[in-house]
Amino acid sequence: MASDDQPVPVFPKPVTLRDVAARAGVSVATASKALNDQGRMTAETRERIRETARSLGFRPNSLAQSLLRRRSFTVGLLTNDTYGRFSLPLMSGISDALVDNGVSVFLCNVEEDPRLGQLHVEAMLDKRVDGIIATGKRIDRHLPVDLADLRVPVIYAFTQPDPDAVAFVSDDAGGARLAVEHFCRLGRRRIAHVSGPASFAVVHARAQAYRDVLAENGLPVTEPLLGSWSEAWGHEAVAHLFDGKRDRPDAVFCGNDQIARGVIDALRERGLDVPGDVGVIGFDNWEIVAEATRPPLTSVDMNLVALGREAGLTLLSLVGGQPAAPGIRQLPCRLVVRQSCGRLPDG
Amino acid sequence: MASDDQPVPVFPKPVTLRDVAARAGVSVATASKALNDQGRMTAETRERIRETARSLGFRPNSLAQSLLRRRSFTVGLLTNDTYGRFSLPLMSGISDALVDNGVSVFLCNVEEDPRLGQLHVEAMLDKRVDGIIATGKRIDRHLPVDLADLRVPVIYAFTQPDPDAVAFVSDDAGGARLAVEHFCRLGRRRIAHVSGPASFAVVHARAQAYRDVLAENGLPVTEPLLGSWSEAWGHEAVAHLFDGKRDRPDAVFCGNDQIARGVIDALRERGLDVPGDVGVIGFDNWEIVAEATRPPLTSVDMNLVALGREAGLTLLSLVGGQPAAPGIRQLPCRLVVRQSCGRLPDG
DNA sequence: CTTAGCTGGGAAAAGGTTTTCTCAAATAGG
DNA sequence: CCTATTTGAGAAAACCTTTTCCCAGCTAAG
């Protein structure tokens, strides 16, 4: 009978609570209560309904539930980090924190396009997300989208927040301290700092921490060398640091892993041993880079997964009605020690 | 009256169609029809209702619409690519194709965990996604999750599909041809191939294309060197290729950009000029790597964004009831020429 | 035996929208 | 002036689930 030229897959109608109730010979109200551990009924009735639901493969329609509860168990994640260098670890942590609560995440890349941002935010709101997390690729820039006075709670993670918002960022100064203090403990005395462009707020935060730690340890402070975030700049910076005849550094703290990579390569080209002659520490702990340097790179990890988890949990409690004090929370970084920084003499 | 210790943001109730109707002095039915260009009414009534909706900032509740239409304008994207190296460009293309149709994307990372996969798929189904796109980090491995006989259409992109499914992958053989033929056109005669582990299907596809092109051009075929996907392996492979005294390659086609990076660095260490003495082409066109090599790396781009867009559009038409022939569609790659491969003598 | 209280379960409303059907008024046709 | 048709708009059902209220029957207390 059926024409089989083009077998079109046919998707069966989902089984509804009504089906379960009919099959079990009860009303939908009773069925609902049985499955949700609500109401009063004999244990026998409850179990019979549950068994029926199981055997029919019943799954409640989330849309209907959401409509009724005014809660969709859905959050939106906005980002402008196309390559996901920072937002994917964040996403991972967020998802991790939420999946056990049955919450799913809409991911939207808004690039730098306000129109796109507007579009995505409206789509999220229309779909009644319970909340929104905004994230980006740098801490000191806004997303190209206005998230003030939305109908839902908003949390900022690793991006510039609106005033009076709840935000999570990494403690860059703390991370820098970790690196420089590690050098100090290892007995390095002339520690240089090569970082990215002055237009980045984190560059200044890290540089100040660098100066502070050196001062605290009575070590000479040389002005940080600012350039770009690239390997090429790391390469070039080594020339600046080592072409002067005296006071050559015995350690370089770099603003990111790519710069560190350039520094290490340039040092090798000059015949300097890492970590023997010069120790190097990077920032970001981008494993794909940190593990490809020779020797493998010690680097500051911003704990983005943990940051994402924290943001997710906070959003959840905000959605649940718990107030959260506005303000920026800085989460600690962690030093991942590999081989580029050297080790304690006795180690 | 109000206690202001802790200013809790209060979120206003969304305005509903009922509100609009009441304000405009019509029934909700009429209001709905006015806003959707349905039904019959005087142009004046229609415009009055629209104006009311605008002034009230009315936005239809997507949940209610979805419930009724049995269509949620939502799709799920499954991946196990934690770093997003491949899935983010895909995601970008998918999102691109869908956002204009008001469709949002749930992104779920299932890692390698079947339990997590099951969890996410069930959450998606409960939320009544219109369809699912499965993607991964390699073409020849399944996600740790069973997507057969779901209640919704499924499309595979850049991951191993179930039989009889619709799938999109990159044409790796074609991409390899592009690279090797380019070398041939440039007059290179001894072209080597350094690639990843033999356990990857793409390694064989690319290697075969490499042999084919060399044979077609009457050039000597040396067996591809298989190793790992790392820079270190690229480095090591150069030793194998150049320590033999004769028939040293004048071109190396690499299985990915990291290998290419290792090859280029090793060549430089040997005093060989790239592209003067040896041309190098990579695969993946991972810009962050390709642009950091010196000289910048020519590489095969798998057009993942386009692949994602194609997958998104196909899923959309599948959801719309258009049948799509099952099978694997290979989408062409593209060669991004930078400086590592050299140029035509007359160029 | 009467009344209060409990028990098991159902009816109905609510959530917000779309769509089909119905109906009164207005218009056209004869 | 009377009937047939069109026009404008509303009532109600449907989507699926949850929750509040209600009720009939039963038990226990007085």
Image: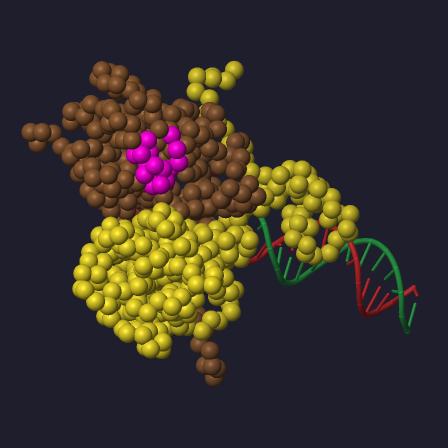
Chain colours: A yellow, B brown, C red, D green
Q: Position of residue A45 (x, y in %)?
A: 75, 47
Residue at 47% x, 71% y: name it: A324
Viewer-proximal residue among B276 and B42: B276
Q: Position of residue B216 (x, y in %)?
A: 24, 16
Left or right of residue A70, residue B23 in this image? left
- Taking the image as drawn, is residue A302 in sight? yes
Q: Position of residue B74 (x, y in %)?
A: 42, 44
Residue at 22% x, 62% y: name it: A241
Rendered position, B334 above or below B16: above
- Taking the image as drawn, is residue B97 in sight? no
Residue at 28% x, 47% y: name it: B288
Quadrant of the image occupied by residue A80 = bottom left
Viewer-proximal residue among B132 and A202: A202
Rendered position, B295 above or below A287: above
Magenta region, residue range: B226-240
User: Can residue A97 be found in the magenta stretch?
Assistant: no
